[in-house]
Image: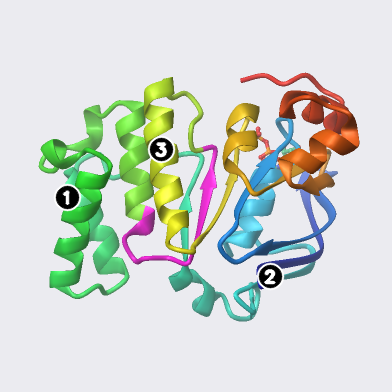
Amino acid sequence: MEPIIEVKNLVKTFDSRGKKITAVNDVSFNVFKGEIFGMIGPNGAGKSTTFSMLTTLTKPTSGSIKIAGFDVEKQDDKIRPIIGIVPQKLSLYPLLTTRENLEFMGKLYNLPKKVMEERIDYYLELVGLEDSADSFTEGFSGGMKQRLSVICAMMHDPQILFWDEPSTGLDPQTRQAIWKLAKKFNEDGKTLIFTTHYMEEAENICDRVAVMNSGKMVALDKPEVLKKTSGSSNLEQVFMHFAGEEVYN
Ligand SMILES: Nc1ncnc2c1ncn2[C@@H]1O[C@H](COP(=O)(O)OP(=O)(O)OP(=O)(O)O)[C@@H](O)[C@H]1O
């Protein structure tokens, strides 16, 4: 299998009021093209910091990251067009309508008008937001915002989608809709990498799951293998085994 993300000896330290915090501590792993890759771990484990470095937003302290063969530090201009990011804190424009938010993203990536319009109509229908196309996003529910955020991130047809906590705070029905969308994205041979606190989702959706704890990647494998090697019957027990903490949602 061809790796599309290659991470070697990645380290990120922060200086917090004179105290050194090692958020990511010598992490190495690959993500393969077309894979659904999940990252789990307790709060503060280093998942979001890893994401931030993978998506070129934060500079690593040391180590290397290649995305589709491009170096994150030297070739970020080559990486940004092929990745989509749905951040933990969603960043929609409340005073723009749904359609305007999508057009804004399309224009950032210089999409031709016709392609942009076709894509907007297709995505709005896919996530069931067609009736809210001309509504301001200000009063949207969490689920509507999450659905719009992911199609904003998909407007430029990225090869890899980074999604930080896709389903946190959403009701089960909306979570199902979100995962349907994620699977659709992946069906086209694209790579999805996401963080989650929902173990059942990680177990059902991911090809492989990485467990992070205190800045380290303490386990990485297929859910079935993780369960077997840790003598667990589900991913919650895997989490407890490797992260030494109880799962919370
Ligand atoms: N900008 C920053 N300055 C100082 N410390 C930071 C900064 N960003 C993250 N940290 C620290 O780095 C560690 C890892 O944080 P990170 O947000 O990556 O964890 P996480 O696994 O994503 O947690 P969560 O599940 O809560 O999102 C934490 O101790 C956090 O306080």
Give left or right: position of 165 versus 148.
right
The residue type indicated by label 3 comes to Ile
Helix or strand or loop: what does disc 3 sit on?
A: helix
Mark 2 and mark 1 residues within 8 Å of each other at the beta carbon: no
Q: Which residue is mark 1?
A: 99
Residue 10: which quarter of the image?
A: bottom right
Q: Disc 2 versus disc 1: distance between alpha carbons?
A: 38 Å
The residue type indicated by label 2 comes to Met
* Closer to the eye: label 2 or 1: 2
Residue under the point 49% across and 62% down? 190
Q: Is residue 90 visible?
A: no
* Closer to the eye: label 3 or 2: 2
Q: Which residue is mark 2?
A: 1
The disc label shown at residue 178, or none: 3
Task: Residue 170 in the image: state x and y as whole percent.
Answer: 43, 24
Helix or strand or loop: what does disc 1 sit on?
A: helix
Q: Is residue 117 visible?
A: yes
Q: Disc 3 versus disc 2: distance between alpha carbons?
A: 27 Å
| Colour scheme of the picture | rainbow
Q: Is residue 155 magenta?
A: yes
Task: Residue 221 in the image: state x and y as whole percent.
Answer: 78, 48
Q: Is residue 164 above or below residue 175?
A: below
